[in-house]
Amino acid sequence: MHVEHLKKSPQVGISFSRSSFMNHKGKPLNFFQMPQLTGITPAHLLCRNPVGNGSAPVIRRETLNDIRFQPLDHAEHYTCYFDEKFRQSEDIECWLRIIATTNWKMEGIPAPLTFYRLNQEGLSSNIMKQLASWEQMIDKARLFAPKLLNKNEQSARAYQLRYLARQSIRNGQGKAATKLINKALSVSPSILLDETGRTCVTFTAAYLLWLLPSSLYKVCENIGQFGMGHIQKMRISRDGVKSSLIS
């Protein structure tokens, strides 16, 4: 499906898909990553990273060759696409370098073609390290896209803090989640207007997790996930995806 997409869209250098969530044991959770699929600008990518995870994209060789570079701090003579200094955020840094410095476009296809495992023991569980790595990526991005950062850095930081609040919720860290979503809103209140639904859901879930007994919160979470998954499946079906690729 990715190959066909790239054949039909020669200007697209990165093709990506939606992903389906599963728990740490591999059980599908019946809700999905639902990013914007088309019209992705450098500003949108900086703020929201529609690719979502490193398993979702298929990339043209020519696209990677256009951002190939030789690390300055290595004695060995070789070239890279991803920046090896990053332990986290290396994917978004690479996508941003492609979209902000070349003529290639990024575009998604509506089918959920990969699974995304929610694993508390993975990289994403260490929220502060993930935030520090993202800030390192921002520092580098200022060098190759200064105008983009001047205009969008604060809103991008707010979206990242909101994303980390959601990660904290998935890890069962209610107090940390409330601090992160509150900080996101203080850094850039505009995210509440730009993406009211997602921001309000994150805010509500963070405070419910923090304030409610875990058993009662789990009931609320299951109800929310069921309702959200049903809405997402209808939306994916409307995009022309066969039911066999959704369930």
Image (cartoon, rainbow, N blue to C red):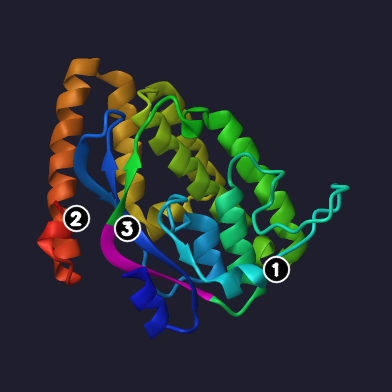
The answer for how far apart the CA atoms under marks 1 and 3 are is 30 Å
Which dot, 1 or 2, sits closer to the camera?
A: 2
> Which disc, if any, is residue 162?
none
Where is residue 112 drawn, in percent x and y?
A: 27, 57
Where is residue 46 drawn, in percent x and y?
A: 55, 59
Which dot, 2 or 3, sits closer to the camera?
A: 3
Quadrant of residue 212 within the rendered picture: top left
Residue interval drawn in magenta: 105-112
- Mark 1 or mark 3: name the one nearer the start of the chain: 3
Q: Nearer the viewer, residue 38 or 241?
A: 241
Where is residue 194 drawn, in percent x and y?
A: 40, 60
Q: Are marks 1 and 2 in contact (CB under 8 Å)?
A: no
Q: Is residue 109 magenta?
A: yes
Give the residue number, with chain letter if any, for mark 3: 18
Q: Nearer the viewer, residue 1 or 45?
A: 1
Q: Nearer the viewer, residue 223 or 57?
A: 57
Q: Residues within 10 Å of mark 1 (few under 14, many from 20)?
A: few
Where is residue 24 drawn, in percent x and y?
A: 31, 29
Left or right: 46 in relation to 239: right
